[in-house]
Amino acid sequence: MIELQKYPIFTYMNPVTQLFHIQYPIIQAGMIWASGWRLASAVSNAGGLGLIGAGSMYPDVLQEHIVKCKQATSKPFGVNIPLLYPGVDRLIDIIIREEVPVVFTSAGNPKTWTPALKAAGIKVVHVVSSASFAKKSEAAGVDAVVAEGFEAGGHNGREETTTLVLIPAVCEQVNIPVIAAGGIASGKSMAAAFALGATGVQIGSRFVATPEASSHPLFKQAILDAGEGDTALTMKKLTPVRLLKNHFYEAVKAAEDNGADKETLATLLGRARAKTGMFEGHLAEGELEIGQVSALINAIQPAAEIVAEIWAEFEFTRKMLSALKF
Ligand SMILES: Cc1cc2nc3c(=O)[nH]c(=O)nc-3n(C[C@H](O)[C@H](O)[C@H](O)COP(=O)(O)O)c2cc1C
């Protein structure tokens, strides 16, 4: 039994705002085919941390987005790189050359690039879906981890650990700041993540439903139309991904039900499936990455409005909870 009274409650500065020199501990996730310079700069200008999603960009495209982002904001911003993509070294070169202050890496080994990025004075954060990987990331020298739960849109862990279980498990294992992701789209869910030990949140799905996101308008509308149970974590034999159920998903499910192996799934996925769906708006055949929380997203709103709304609701929720009498 924990004797809570022996733990003093003291005030402390938020480590995530301090780490990135930002106003609010709200990070807009790096997202392929969604988060270019427009979205990232809008979030950074609003006091959060905007991330350019480099996973869908050739090196010259990333370079252009970084330059435009610098022109659009004087605030800190970052770049997300999924490490499984080929040509990562060229993206890293550009990031270092352009003096991008923050990099979020995902889908790969944090040992590979963290030393080079840190040597260039860049803050490095790695995305994990398990406590054991969080520990490995800390040992690799990252400044913080994003702990991403099962609810999250896009690529995810095989463990299927929900955000509610993952955050305290990760907080127990590491001594660096933990940023919660997966299923967070409001100030209330942000407060819940903080109650679990996180000191920042990374939000993806809600920021796709913004005018600044580069995703196709039909995909944005599909997010608004999505209801409970309309997403699934699929392709666990290949690379697990949470997406909106559509014709492509049904084809994958039928193949999986018939015992399809990794190679068969890779053939079914083919090339550019995510671009086809999220960027070009082919809703039946494309891969439409989005989180469970899409069921709670009902409007396209400017990114700055979302940041302000989430922060106001977070502050209100904190006051409501402390006003509760028993
Ligand atoms: C459309 C979309 C694309 C994504 N692309 C990436 C990516 O390129 N790299 C990455 O690390 N995570 C990616 N993610 C995951 C997000 O970074 C984030 O962790 C996740 O969306 C958080 O959960 P939420 O969707 O419930 O807010 C993507 C998510 C979405 C919805």
Image (cartoon, rainbow, N blue to C red):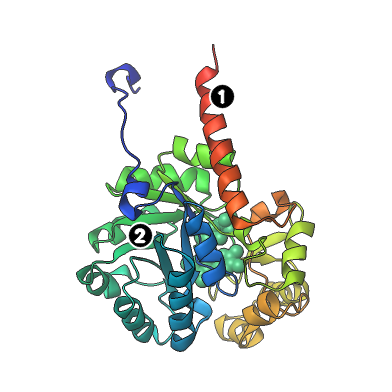
Q: Residue at x 32, y 45 (%)?
A: 15
The answer to whether residue 317 is above or below residue 93 is above
Ligand 1 shows up in the quarter that is: bottom right
Q: Residue at x 51, y 65 (%)?
A: 40
The answer to whether residue 107 is above or below residue 205 is below
Image quadrant containing the C terminus? top right
Question: What number is the disc on residue 320?
Answer: 1
Observer-nearest of 161 and 174:
174
Q: Position of residue 171 (x, y in %)?
A: 36, 44
Indicate the secondary structure of the residue bearing disc 2: helix
Q: Position of residue 209 (x, y in %)?
A: 67, 60
Question: What number is the disc on residue 260?
Answer: none
Observer-nearest of 31 and 214:
214
Q: Which residue is mark 2?
A: 133
The kind of residue on which mark 2 rests is Phe
Which one is closest to the eye, mark 2 or mark 1? 1
Q: Residue at x 57, y 86 (%)?
A: 263
Crowding at dot 2, Cα within 10 Å, few <14 / some 14-19 / many 20+, comes out as some
Indicate the secondary structure of the residue bearing disc 1: helix
**Separation of marks 2 and 1 at Cα, in angstroms:** 35 Å
The answer to whether residue 233 is above or below residue 94 is above
Asked whether the viewer can see residue 155, the reply is no
Q: Residue furthest left?
A: 119
Q: Position of residue 203 (x, y in %)?
A: 54, 55
Asked whether the viewer can see residue 144, the reply is yes
Q: Position of residue 258 (x, y in %)?
A: 70, 76
